[in-house]
Amino acid sequence: MSASVRRLSSILLLVPGLASAQFVEAVRALRAPVPAIVPADLGVREYTLKGYPKGTEPCVASAVRIGEAVARAAGVKVVRAYCSAEDANGYEIKVVYEAAEALRPVTTVNRAGRGEGFGAFDTRQECEAALAAEAAAFEAATGLAPVVSYCLRDDLSDKGSWSMRIDSFGAARLAPMTKTLPVFTRPDGVGRSEFLGGIKDRLQAQGVDARFVAWRPVSGYAELSIAYYAAQRLAFELSEPAKLDSKAQCQAALAEMQPVLAARTPAPLALYCGQQMIGGWEVAWMYMGAPSIKTVMAAESFKSYADCMAARVRVAEHHRSDLGQHVVGSVCSREVLEYAWKVILLEE
């Protein structure tokens, strides 16, 4: 009899009225083996890289090197790292590892879109020339050393088809994020680099670590993507408050809106006249967050642009004086669904 059982027997004998069956059950419980601590279920999972470029080393060497980097950065056991496929754009590399949950890489790849990364370069050479500086910016913003950094190609776009994939693992100080907006109004009278550079400059002036503002042509429209670092996702709005028939009408509406918007914050990231992809002209604006001014369509309808322009000041004054609305400006807009022209009121 063990010492622990002897001690228990001594104690139980001193307790009057304790049934013998209770004594036996207590001894059995003491003799029962202590259950072993079962480790958490470790599943076998995969981390996949697509379009990894063909370089000077064999793919198998790249896969092994990446697998070792993943093991160090993520603290997981890597079972295997290998090349699973090959095409004209590069290799597909898989890293197989054991973990209770799948790893969530800190990555510049936009999961919500087609998988493009930061930037939109016309050639691989242009992308790779900027890659080292962007990898350093990634580390500075996230606090994480990159596990991989390379340029990948999006086959669905003819221009701006090369972008950067930079990945790491861990808790990032700031996360890489991308917001993609559909654009149906092509800017008029301004070059692509000047237009996109202006948006980037204004974002940085508003305190955003904006890395790239990119333009990707798509069939029938374009995509404007904003790549940035932040603690949480930012909201962006790109809309067309006024629709016109001609460039001259659009420029007149833009001239009315510019001084009204210039006096208010936040300033628009973009404010321009442009042609719709399917015809017609529009005043378009883009904001981080909500626009600094509201647009309200007045109820009255007009048969022509001239009739609308002739009544615009009267309609605005009626809403200001008689209805007590804070109207600070107005423009005319052609409303296709109503087959009419309407006054768009600019309200504080």
Image: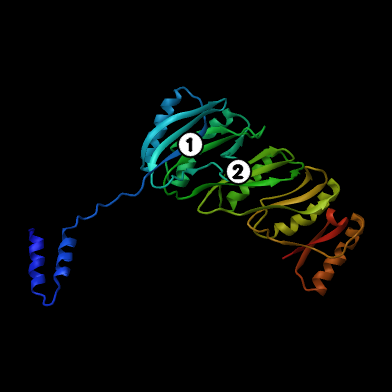
Q: Say whether marks 2 and 1 touch (CB < 8 Å).
A: no
- Mark closer to the observer (2, 1): 1
Q: Residue at x 82, y 74 (%)?
A: 322
SS of the residue under disc 2? loop
Q: Residue at x 55, y 33 (%)?
A: 152
* Most foreground residue, 317 or 172: 172
Residue 306 - label: none
Three-letter residue code for mark 2: Gly
* Most foreground residue, 243 or 317: 243
Q: Position of residue 188 (x, y in %)?
A: 77, 42
Is there any visible trace of residue 78 in the rendered image? yes
Residue 113 - label: 2
The colouring scheme, among rainbow, by chain, secondary structure or one colour, is: rainbow
Mark 2 and mark 1: Cα distance apart in space: 17 Å
Q: Quadrant of residue 276?
A: top right
Q: Position of residue 310 (x, y in %)?
A: 91, 60
Three-letter residue code for mark 1: Thr
Quadrant in the picture for the N terminus: bottom left
Q: Position of residue 215 (x, y in %)?
A: 66, 40
- Examine the rendered structure and indicate whether residue 77 appears above or below residue 323: above
Q: Position of residue 262 (x, y in %)?
A: 70, 57
Q: Which residue is mark 1?
A: 48
| Relative horizontal placement of residue 46, taking residue 113 as reference (left or right) | left
Q: Residues within 10 Å of mark 1 (few under 14, many from 20)?
A: few
Q: Earlier in the sequence, mark 2 or mark 1?
A: 1
| Relative horizontal placement of residue 71, taking residue 293 as reference (left or right) | left
Q: Residues within 10 Å of mark 2 (few under 14, many from 20)?
A: few
- Examine the rendered structure and indicate whether residue 222 appears above or below residue 304: above
Quadrant in the picture for the C terminus: bottom right
| Relative horizontal placement of residue 182, taking residue 13 as reference (left or right) | right
Q: Quadrant of residue 198?
A: top right
